[in-house]
Amino acid sequence: MKLTALRLVMVAMIGGMAGAAPVQAADDVVIVYDASGSMWGQIEGTSKIEIAREVMADLVDDWDAETNLGLIAYGHRQEGDCTDIETMVAPGSVDRTSFINTVNAITPLGKTPISASVQQAADLLSYRDTPATVVLISDGAETCNADPCALSDQLARQGVKFTVHVVGFDLDEEENASLSCIAENTGGVFVPASNADELYDAFDEVRSVMDAEPTAPEPEPAEPATPEVTLTGPEQVTTGAAFDVSWSQTISDSDMVAIVPIGADEGTRNNYRRTGDASEGSLTAPADPGLYELRYILDEGKKTLATVPIEVIKAEIEISGPEQATAGAAFDVSWSQTVGGSDMVAIVPVGADEGTRNNYLRTKDKTEGRLTAPAEPGLYELRYILDEGKKTLATAPIEVVEAEIELTGPAQATTGAAFDVSWSQTVSGSDMVAIVPVGADEGTRNNYRRTKDKTEGRLIAPAEPGLYELRYILDEGKKTLATAPIEVVEAEIGISGPGAVRAETDVDISWSATIGSSDMVAIVPVGADEGTRNIYLRTGDKTEGKLTAPAEPGLYEIRYILNEGKKTVAMAPLEVVGADAPLDEGAYLSVPKTAAPGATIAVSWTGESDSADQRIALARKDQPDFSWISVHKVAAEESVDITMPQEQGLYEVRFLDVAGRVVLGRAIVEVK
């Protein structure tokens, strides 16, 4: 028996219908074909894709020539792509060979978007306007984060007569449960099948159910009665104000309650809210006074079900503030009432366009607050501005006058040094006092400090000498209110250290003056880039310090580096020699480089001082310069024998000028 007035969709998700009886169906049939990766699974030694291809071939061979046939496939082009759904054959007269070749060319690859496939099939068949039937045969549950149960319930409610028959092919108990709800929600049947034979039987059962449905076209459903909704709201509301509205029942959570001008076109919403699952809520009145109406509007078709008139009247607001304010200064403002918490109170130039806000505050639940005057003097006005429509409800005039500031500082400052600066008054705690090059662009700050609630403070002079100026800069608009000239001169610093040191030994350094406590004294390779620090110390409030020489011998320099700009203002050369190299200052020692424990070595020298107390001393390498293990006075001869200690290690032979506290020469001997 041929099914009439019915559109049939077969969603062949995994299995097939090999051996089924000739198909009799509606005029248009679309097969949605599963090409997901699970189709490669086997049943009784045969892959599911092979079974499906055989069934499709039998199905098409027996297809009613009077019935159009189409094909949708999914999962055949991309792995992991839940949108991989494609119409392979548009509904039309069956070209059996072409249709079967198309099916056989499909290769399983991707995911299983059951919900999206059923939805696409329903849309293809215009399920909202025409009866539609889907036959879903699946070997797995949804894999694309969708809920087939919820979707089927929605389609059944929205469709004219939407039915899904489901065959669960090779599914476990949980998967059967996840698919059976689709049939239950749409009035279809669910039949499980665990092998090829049961699949054929299941298809016969589904076909029998479809054959049993009425053959005559179903009558057009009667126009549903329009639901009755009663809408309630105030007779009068103030422009921009929130007000309560209620309705007797909610037809759909997506319906709307709106306030619109009387006689507005059907579907006009303007200010509206969704009903949700409530029966009351709040709306905001328009900014323009006049006659309006509340409407209950169906989301479906945007049809108005109920109306009630409402008048919107202008809010009566008064705003007040000082007649005059200083540029950049905060001042008090008040207003008689607040219409909406998101409304604004603003200061704008006289005659500014409606909606201009410039400096403003939100009213919240207050009737007073503080604004900041603009940086430019002139005539302004205070405005109370509705958030709704950005409409001005009240104004008050105010004049902004220039602040008179005097700024004082030294005529001259040293590069990188801190210096004192003062100003006659503070306009705002966020204003700034800065030192910038003469003629710098407005708003330039460079080295600056916030004024806070003070009238004096300290700034740091730039690292580069030159002509500068002190500026008092408003935070509002970054406008300069006062200036004072200042010259920055080069710092004169001297720095000194030993001419040569052994690697990784202490280096005593002194400098003539400290400019800033965060300045640095550093040892760097000769010619290192400006700002290089390597081994360094902070000067603090000292004029001397100690650093450790680098491990690598070579030519270095000691630098005094300003923290400001990391600029070098003084330097002295330093040679780093090997850890066991001799260091001579007036005498050259000749000693062996190694000696056995307890051995006697001969030490000789050339050169000496005029001191009456000169000595040759043996000390551990890490002992202070004028302490020793043994010592010998220098006589007329220029050599002496020294007995080495029994303990292995590094020792140092020193030529000492004891009277002058000078080490004239050093040499290392290793006992091993």
Image: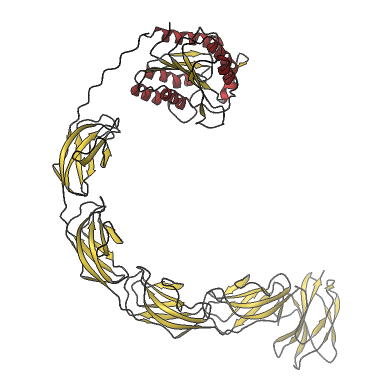
Q: What percent of the width, then of the height, locates residue 492? A: 56, 85
Foreground: 617 or 609? 609
Q: Is residue 493 above or below residue 195?
A: below
Q: What percent of the width, then of the height, locates residue 256? A: 26, 36
Q: What percent of the width, then of the height, locates residue 433? A: 40, 75
Q: Is residue 163 visible?
A: no
Q: Is residue 156 above or below residue 234?
A: above
Corner quadrant of residue 165: top left
Q: What percent of the width, then of the height, locates residue 418? A: 47, 79
Residue shown at 48% from the left, 84% from the top: 487
Image quarter (top left, top right, bottom left or bottom right) of the C terminus: bottom right
Q: Is residue 638 above or below residue 669?
A: below
The count of marks equals 0
Foreground: 192 or 60? 60
Q: Is residue 421 left or right of residue 653?
A: left
Corner quadrant of residue 611: bottom right
Corner quadrant of residue 153: top left
